[in-house]
Amino acid sequence: MAIRPKKILAPLAVLLLSACNVGPNFLSPTPRAPDAWSKAALDAPAYARSRAAARAVDAAWWESFHDPTLTWLVTSAEADNPDIEEATSRIAETREQRRVAYAGFWPTLDASASDTRLRISENSPFASIAGGRASVGGQPNASQGIAIPTGPKPGLTIYQAGFDAAWELDIFGRTRRGVEAAEADIRSAERLLDNARLSLRAEAARAYLELRGLQARQGIARQSLRLQRDNAALTRSRAASGFATEVDVANANALVASTEATLPQLDAQVTQATNRLSRLLGQEPGTLADRLSAPAPQPPAPPSVAIGLPVETIRRRPDVAAAEAALAAQTARIGVATAQLYPSLRINGSIGLQSGNTANLFEAASRFFSIGPALIVPIFEGGRLRAQIRLEEARQRTAAVVWRRTVLDALHEVENALAAYYGDQGRRDALRRQSVAARQAASLARTRFTAGLGTFLEVLDAERTRLAAELAVAESAAAVSTDLVAVYKALGGGWEPRGG
């Protein structure tokens, strides 16, 4: 009987038109964020200046330090960094996974060839086909007027070659949900790459600024050491003339030794900071030593930065976007699991050549074909399908918790970075005033000691205070700069503020 295409296509069209995606649809969650940053985290005047004066912060936020070496390091860090390479490979994986998911929309086509030897039961009604004995109702079929063949036991060989095709119609959206999950995985991987880049840039900037701060402290210690050695020589000369005591000489020598002891530690820290930069650039230790060995001024940080509102920060943060995309992917996987509960409709077809011997296998009479729909309805799976749905729902709840935690961590990170940034600015300014006063006191103490109006103990105390104050200023200036890097990282990188 001929198969009329309309008899197959009509019901298929009805099913396709009624196709739907089972499972929940993803809705972007609304983060719980305050209307403004807390007063405890902000210096109000600085915040006002940042909103009024900083009209835009370019995505290349590191350029706000106006340091060519810093710009070179940050822009070069991505070239051969293993973390960036890993994140990039993750994107390639998710894109291939999307191609795998998309393949479910297409039919499959397989070529096959077989040489099958069959042995048929001698009591089978089909035994006569294979040259054996056939019976009807347990009696030999000779009573039916059929000749009983004699010969070997019933058997035959079938030679077959052809093509098998199958196409599963995505009526309940299992494939569409799989593609939806794969595309969300791509978005998540891309945002994780953005986050890796942001972290790498911030880490490179932080390491460089710390290096310049250590080199500044090195310079202060060496300059102080030269001055202290001069003071020690002067003290020995005055002791020889009877204007100073051996106690003064011992104290002067002790101060020199104390300052000398700080230099090896600073040298080691400079080497470690340089090697940390080499590691971030994917290079061997010591590669950047020649380029960064010459001291340079500490890049000054701007006094204010445009920060925007908490909800704007949440939208900019790549880690929050990655967590949201992961939640979307997991929501789609619930639909994939749910679709397994519903019937599946497949169109199966075969075409090829079939014969009992190879001599006439390629004749026109050996052709065969078959085509028709197959409806598969799951009835009993031992609870596996519903357990899979519950598993995906549990994973979705976990992904939602991860997203909420990421949002909360982002808000706290910004608050803490801002508090440190503005707080260290105030500390740096106070230390600068202290350093100016300490230098004046040390100069007066030396003058009085040289004129014989003061004791060396006054010089010793004044020098110790001056050195500590200058080292603290250098350390504080580096802290302010690294705090600004932390602010930019917490804000999700550079951005252009909206409104005034």
Image (spheres, rainbow, N blue to C red):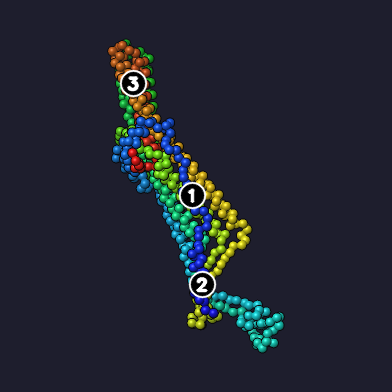
| Percent x, y of residue 272 | 39, 37
C-alpha gap between disc 2 and disc 1: 40 Å
Question: x, y (%) of residue 281?
Answer: 37, 44
Q: Nearer the viewer, mark 2 or mark 3?
A: 2
Comes first in the chain, label 2 or label 1: 2
Amino acid at the residue labelled 1: Leu
Which residue does the image show at 33% across and 33% down from the upper left? 49
The part of the image, by quadrant, that contains residue 239 is top left
Q: Earlier in the sequence, mark 2 or mark 3?
A: 2
Q: Amino acid at mark 3?
A: Ala
Residue 413 left/right relative to 216: right
What secondary structure is found at the residue carrying circle 3?
A: helix
Relative horizontal placement of residue 349, taking residue 129 as reference (left or right)? left
Q: Is residue 279 visible?
A: no
Q: Residue at x 46, y 45 (%)?
A: 30
Question: Looking at numbered disc 2 in the image, what kind of residue is underneath it?
Answer: Ile
Specify the quadrant that holds the N terminus. bottom right
SS assignment at label 1: helix
Which sits earlier in the primary sequence, circle 3 or circle 1? 1
Which residue was labeled with disc 1?
A: 327
How many neighbours does mark 1 have within 10 angstroms: few (below 14), some (14-19), or many (20 or more)? many
